[in-house]
Image (tube, rainbow, N blue to C red):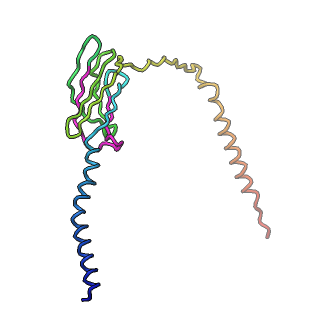
Amino acid sequence: MTGIRKVFAAVLVGLAVTVSAAAPAAARAAQAAPAAQADKLKLAVAGDGAQGVTIQASYADGRRLEQVVRLVLTATGPDGQKVGPVQLEPQPEGHGFYSSGPVLSTGTWKVTVNSPAPLQSKATATVQARAAQSPPVPEPVAVNKATDGAGGAGAGWWPFAAAGLVLVAAAMGVAMLFGRRRTD
């Protein structure tokens, strides 16, 4: 082997050893950055329009939450009333969506939602709880039936249409019978 080849082979072996030693460290560093982001949750707390609370949980970087997390709600309301701790269950409306159901009475509440480790987070919001509203009762509609058997103003046209169709069919039948004459 010539000297240049020996030097070239030594450089390649040194480069391969350096790359193989640095690869696990680079992989650990690449995994550590998303893991640090994944350890934080963003919790959006809001009232549900009645006497409950809704929570939308996502990762701090905006990715949607694919796993179930344990969220605990506590609330302080008017006149020092306290609710909780209440463990929230995920709802079928979407990933990371939680709802408390009707746990608050009417008034202004300070609501705190906590998520324990490993996805530790805390959010506080002021929620206005209102009495549940029911839809308005529809007005009754009067139904008037014709008593003379006529069936209404526009019900008398179909016998005339049927008679017209019968006349057209009869005229076509007569035309077909007498229209063809044989010439021998």
Above or below residue 177? Residue 142 is: above
Above or below residue 124? Residue 35 is: below
Image quadrant for the N terminus?
Answer: bottom left
- Residue 103, by quadrant, is top left
Residue range corresponding to the magenta coloring: 54-75
Above or below residue 70? Residue 102 is: above
Query: Where residue 47 sits: x, y (%)?
Result: 35, 25
> Which residue: 76% across, 58% down?
179
Q: Nearer the viewer, residue 95 or 108?
A: 108
Query: Where residue 57 sits: x, y (%)?
Result: 31, 36
Image quadrant for the C terminus?
Answer: bottom right
Query: Where residue 154 sits: x, y (%)?
Result: 64, 28
Q: Nearer the viewer, residue 61 or 13?
A: 13
**Residue lying at the far front of the rendered structure:** 3
Image-based side of 118 in relation to 147, left or right: left
**Residue lying at the far bottom of the rendered structure:** 1
Is 66 covered by the magenta stretch? yes
Is 65 covered by the magenta stretch? yes
> Which residue: 32% across, 15% down?
106
Image-based side of 60 in relation to 81, left or right: right
> Which residue: 24% across, 27% down?
73
- Residue 117, by quadrant, is top left
Could you tell me how many numbered marks the image carries? Answer: 0
> Which residue: 74% across, 54% down?
175
Query: Where residue 20 sits: x, y (%)?
Result: 23, 67
Image-based side of 69 in relation to 46, left or right: left
